[in-house]
Image: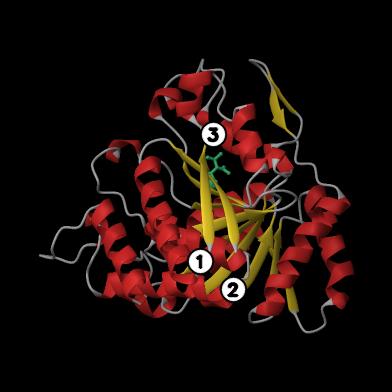
Amino acid sequence: MDLKIAVLPGDGIGPEISEQGVAVMNAVCEKFGHHVSYQYALCGAEAIDKVGDPFPEETFKVCMDADAVLFSAVGDPKFDNDPTAKVRPEQGLLAMRKKLGLFANIRPVETFDCLIHKSPLKDELVRGADFICIRELTGGMYFGEKYQDDEKAYDTNAYTRPEIERILRVAYEYAMRRRKHLTVVDKANVLASSRLWRQVAKEMAPQYPEVETDYMFVDNAAMRMIQDPRFFDVMVTENTFGDILTDEGSCITGSMGLLPSASTGEHTPVFEPIHGSWPQAKGQNIANPLAQILSVAMLFEYFDLKEEGALIRKAVNASLDANVRTPEIQVEGGERYGTTEVGQWIVDYIKNA
Ligand code: IPM
Ligand code: MN
């Protein structure tokens, strides 16, 4: 297969993990005889500094022209600490999502047996938890009408029927391929937007008789996720609830630094780690590249290249088993491995597989 990849390394540790993602992608393509080419583009704080726009038109063009985007991270504290800043790196991410029509954010919440002890939950509660959160990504409060003055401010949580239908469709398709259990998360006891979500979901459910659909209020879902995370198989929810619940989901696994995500929709799909740009670690070769590397696995799987994805997952598991780990998950007294060493180990594993 011929793959044209847009690479957006972004800020902080972004460029370091991006490099390892690309190295792994190259190794897999070589092994399976795919041809891959890359085009690098600016985004986030780096793009603001260089061209004054966190998602420049040129970057948009590069993305539109590619088969997939390998995204790393954006964000820089110099903007967080400046309330007068008119443009922020995060706006680049939001612009990318909107302009590429990436309405479906797929965030798998998986545990790794050897990292269970890092979870804030008891081992017996969380072991084996494996669910996917499908977060609507281009609607709701993030993009609804906003207003702010010194006395009053609001954000509008607007959703239309087609927006709800298309994300529910994605969720049902995932549920069909998994354990056939879908949880629709909303706040229908209070919010009108949620009541429309629930209405549309109830209309659609009979089209998927094999799937058990349940409806849960978001506050209850937040609780259930820590009391009984294995309850969930596929969860679908609106943009803001999904933002909050996926942070909760990723941290209960004990392996936040290992979780990838995919954003798909109308145009080029984007694959990125769930974690952020960790500016304090920039240039220190300590960031864990595994979430980025697993994003590459998701990228292959998106194109139905299952063996390629599986080999990456196997290599990642082998590296963890071999204690080839970055400092935050290193076992006591273990050898020190940096970002580049972990990446290189995985590349070698793939080459020799
Ligand atoms: C995420 C992030 C973003 C979001 C921020 C950086 C705008 O938290 O991808 O979850 O809120 O969607
Ligand atoms: Mn978030």
Residue 41's x, y, as percent?
A: 52, 35
Residue position for label 1: 109
Q: Can you tell which quarter of the image residue 205 is in?
A: bottom right
Residue 339's x, y, as percent?
A: 28, 52
Earlier in the chain: of badge 3 and badge 2, it is 3
Q: Regarding mark 2 in the picture, which secondary structure is present there? A: loop
For ligand 2, tell me if the residue under mark 2 lies within 8 Å.
no
Above or below, comparing residue 276 to residue 44 in the picture: below
Q: Regarding mark 3 in the picture, which secondary structure is present there? A: helix
The residue depicted at 27 percent of the width and 38 percent of the height is 283
241 displayed left or right of 184: left
Residue position for label 3: 90
- How packed mark 1 is, by other alpha carbons closer than 10 Å (few <14, some 14-19, many 20 or more), is many
Asked if the residues shown at circle 1 and circle 2 are in contact, with their CB atoms under 8 angstroms apart, the answer is: yes
For badge 2, the amino acid type reads Phe
Labels 3, 2: front one: 3
339 displayed left or right of 259: left
Q: Is residue 330 visible?
A: yes
